[in-house]
Image: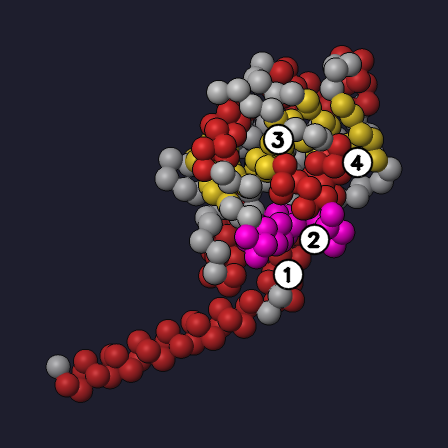
C-alpha cells in the first residue's frame, strides 16, 4: 500500500540508537524523518554528516517529550505522522501495519499497543506493573476503552496533527500521552489500537522517572476523574454487600 507518511522521533542522548534506527526506517516507504533533539551531550549532532537527508531540530534545553512530538508534527506536511521512541523499543516493521490500519479504519490516531490481542511487551517486570496499572486506572477513571494509552508508538492523521499543533497546554512527559488521548476522544477524533511488539531497551537509560509517575496520578486527580472512580468502586462494593445479604437471607 502506498502512503504519504513522516516519522517524528524525540531524542535525548540517543546517538548510538539513532544510528541503528534511521537506516531501518529508510528501508520503508517513509517520506521524511524528523529528529527532535533536546540538547543531547553525546554527539547526536554529528549524525547530520552521516544522514544529510534527515531533518534535525536541535532545541535549547530539555523541553520535554510531548513538546518535541508536537514541534515535530508542526514541521511535517504528510498525510500521516508516525511518532516513536529513539531507544529501539519500537520496531520499524510495525509501522506499515499501523498506517494501513489508520487508512482502512479512518483512524486519526492508531496506538501501537502492547496490551491488545497479539501485542507483546518484553519490558522489565516493574515497568510492566507500572504501565498496566496506569492504563487500568486511566481506563476506569476516564471511561475510555483503550488498553495502552501510555504508549508512545503512534500514527496520527494530518487532521489530528493540525489540531494538536494548536494546543499550547498539553501535559508534558509520560502523562502527556494520556492527555492527548483524552483530548482527541472528547473532540470526536477516532482512535484505534494496533498490536505491536515492545522491545526492551538495550542501550542508554530509560527516561521514565518517579516524577513522571507522580505527575500521572496528579493528572487524574486534577481532572477529578479519580472521584468518579472512587464513587464507582464504592457503589460496586455496596451493591455486592446488599446482594450477599439478600442471598444469605432469602436463598
Q: Nearer the viewer, mark 4 or mark 3?
A: 3
> Residue 170 colored magenta?
yes
Between 41 and 110, the residue placed more toward the observer is: 110
- Picture coordinates of residue 218, whole percent (x, y): 64, 63
Q: Earlier in the sequence, mark 2 or mark 1?
A: 2
Q: Earlier in the sequence, mark 2 or mark 4?
A: 4
**Whether label 2 touches label 4, CB < 8 Å:** no
Q: Viewed as shown, does residue 180 lie left or right of 58? A: left
Q: Earlier in the sequence, mark 1 or mark 4?
A: 4
Between 71 and 224, the residue placed more toward the observer is: 71
Q: Earlier in the sequence, mark 3 or mark 2?
A: 3
Between 57 and 237, the residue placed more toward the observer is: 57
User: To which residue does mark 2 refer?
Assistant: 171
Local packing at callout 3 (Cα closer than 10 Å; few below 14, some 14-19, many 20+) is some
- Which range is magenta? 166-188
The residue shown at (55%, 52%) is 188
Q: Residue furthest left?
A: 251
- Residues under labels 1 and 4: Cα distance? 24 Å
Between 128 and 33, the residue placed more toward the observer is: 33
The residue shown at (68%, 46%) is 164
Q: Nearer the viewer, mark 3 or mark 2?
A: 3
Q: Earlier in the sequence, mark 4 or mark 3?
A: 4
Local packing at callout 1 (Cα closer than 10 Å; few below 14, some 14-19, many 20+) is some
**Whether label 2 touches label 1, CB < 8 Å:** yes
User: To which residue does mark 3 refer?
Assistant: 79
Mark number, residue 169: none
User: To which residue does mark 4 refer?
Assistant: 38
Residue 32 visible in rendering? yes
User: To which residue does mark 1 refer?
Assistant: 219
- Picture coordinates of residue 153, whole percent (x, y): 57, 36
Amino acid at each position: 500500500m502506498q502512503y504519504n507518511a513522516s516519522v517524528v522521533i524525540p531524542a535525548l542522548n540517543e546517538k548510538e540508537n539513532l544510528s541503528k534506527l534511521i537506516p531501518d526506517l529508510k528501508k520503508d516507504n517513509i517520506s521524511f524523518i524528523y529528529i527532535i533533539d533536546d540538547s543531547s551531550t553525546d554527539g547526536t549532532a554529528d549524525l547530520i554528516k552521516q544522514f544529510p537527508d534527515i531533518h534535525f531540530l536541535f532545541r535549547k534545553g530539555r523541553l520535554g517529550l510531548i513538546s518535541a512530538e508536537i514541534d515535530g508534527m508542526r514541521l511535517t506536511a504528510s498525510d500521516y505522522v508516525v511518532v516513536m521512541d529513539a531507544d529501539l523499543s519500537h520496531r520499524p516493521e510495525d509501522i506499515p501495519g499501523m498506517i494501513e490500519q489508520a487508512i482502512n479504519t479512518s483512524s486519526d490516531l492508531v496506538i501501537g499497543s502492547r496490551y491488545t490481542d497479539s501485542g507483546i511487551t518484553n519490558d522489565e517486570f516493574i515497568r510492566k506493573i507500572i504501565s498496566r496499572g496506569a492504563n487500568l486506572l486511566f481506563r476506569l477513571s476516564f471511561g475510555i476503552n483503550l488498553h495502552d494509552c501510555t504508549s508512545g508508538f503512534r500514527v496520527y492523521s494530518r487532521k489530528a496533527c493540525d489540531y494538536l499543533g494548536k494546543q499550547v497546554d498539553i501535559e508534558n512527559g509520560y502523562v502527556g500521552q494520556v492527555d492527548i488521548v483524552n483530548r482527541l476522544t472528547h473532540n470526536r477524533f477516532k482512535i484505534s489500537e494496533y498490536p505491536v511488539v515492545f522491545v526492551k531497551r538495550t542501550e542508554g537509560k530509560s527516561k521514565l522517572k518517579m516524577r513522571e509517575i507522580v505527575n500521572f496520578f496528579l493528572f487524574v486527580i486534577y481532572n477529578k476523574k479519580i472521584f468518579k472512580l472512587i464513587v464507582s468502586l464504592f457503589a460496586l462494593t455496596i451493591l455486592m454487600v446488599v446482594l450477599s445479604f439478600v442471598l444469605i437471607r432469602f436463598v
